[in-house]
C-alpha cells in the first residue's frame, strides 16, 4: 500500500466518528486507531491468511456457548446480497460452511467479504441491508 493511500485513510479517520479502521491490500494490513484526544495512530502488519482484520477474539468467549457471533470487522455499508436484485448470501436457518461468504461491507469503495469462521446453522441474522454498521456490530450468529 502506498503512502498516499495511507494518508487518505488517516485523514478519513480524523474527519469521521469512527475510532478504528482496518484495510488489507495484498499482503499488508493497515490499522488506524483514534484515541480520546482525537489523535490517529497507525500500525501495519503482514496480513494473516484466513483471518478477518479487526475481529475481536475475546467477544467469541463472551457469547453463548452454543452460538458463535459474526461481527462487523470494519465500519461501512452492509450488503446482504452480491448485487442489487439478487438473492441474499444467506437466510435465517441456512446451513453454512467455514469460509462461505455471508455479507459484504463496503468501506471507502472497497468491498470486504465477511465469511463464516465456522460451519453451522444461521440462528440470528441482522435485518440491516444497505445501511451502515459499526465495527463490532453483531451481523449473525452461527450455532
Image (spheres, grey):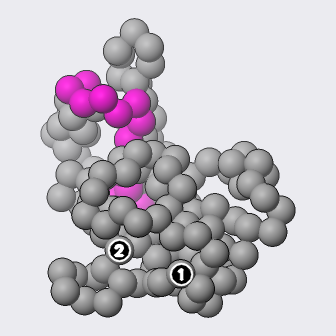
Residue 125 in the image, given as x and y percentages of width and height: 51, 70
Element on which disc 2 rests: loop
Q: Is residue 120 left or right of residue 43?
A: right
Q: Is residue 1 left or right of residue 31?
A: left
Query: Measuring 76% from the left and 48% from the top, which residue is drawn there?
Result: 62
Quadrant of the rendered image containing residue 21: top left
Q: Which residue is mark 1?
A: 92
Q: Which residue is mark 2?
A: 80
**Front label number (1 vs 2):** 1
Residue at the top extreme of this rendering = 37
Q: Magenta stretch: residue 90 in it?
A: no
User: Of callouts 1 and 2, which one flags the residue occurring earlier in the amino acid sequence?
Assistant: 2
Q: Residues within 10 Å of mark 1 (few under 14, many from 20)?
A: some
Q: Is residue 134 left or right of residue 77?
A: right
In the image, the segment drawn in magenta is 14-27
Query: Measuring 21% from the left and 82% from the top, which residue is drawn there?
Result: 83
Element on which disc 1 rests: loop
Disc 1 vs disc 2: Cβ atoms closer than 8 Å?
no
Q: How many marks?
A: 2
Q: Is residue 119 above or below residue 13?
A: below
Q: Quadrant of the C terminus?
A: bottom right
Q: Is residue 86 above or below residue 50?
A: below
Q: Does residue 53 show up?
A: no
Q: Is residue 132 above or below residue 49?
A: above
Query: Measuring 74% from the left and 54% from the top, which residue is drawn there?
Result: 63
Amino acid at each position: 500500500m502506498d503512502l498516499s493511500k495511507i494518508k487518505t485513510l488517516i485523514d478519513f479517520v480524523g474527519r469521521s466518528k469512527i475510532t478504528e479502521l482496518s484495510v488489507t491490500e495484498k499482503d499488508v494490513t493497515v490499522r488506524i486507531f483514534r484515541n480520546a484526544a482525537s489523535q490517529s495512530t497507525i500500525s501495519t502488519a503482514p496480513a494473516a491468511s484466513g483471518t478477518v482484520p479487526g475481529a475481536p477474539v475475546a467477544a467469541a468467549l463472551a457469547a453463548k456457548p452454543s452460538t458463535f457471533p459474526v461481527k462487523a470487522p470494519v465500519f461501512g455499508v452492509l450488503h446482504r446480497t452480491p448485487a442489487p436484485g439478487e438473492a441474499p448470501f444467506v437466510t435465517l436457518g441456512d446451513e453454512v460452511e467455514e469460509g462461505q461468504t455471508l455479507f459484504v461491507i463496503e468501506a471507502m469503495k472497497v468491498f470486504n467479504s465477511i465469511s463464516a469462521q465456522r460451519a453451522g446453522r444461521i440462528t440470528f441474522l441482522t435485518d440491516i441491508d444497505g445501511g451502515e454498521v459499526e465495527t463490532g456490530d453483531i451481523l449473525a450468529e452461527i450455532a
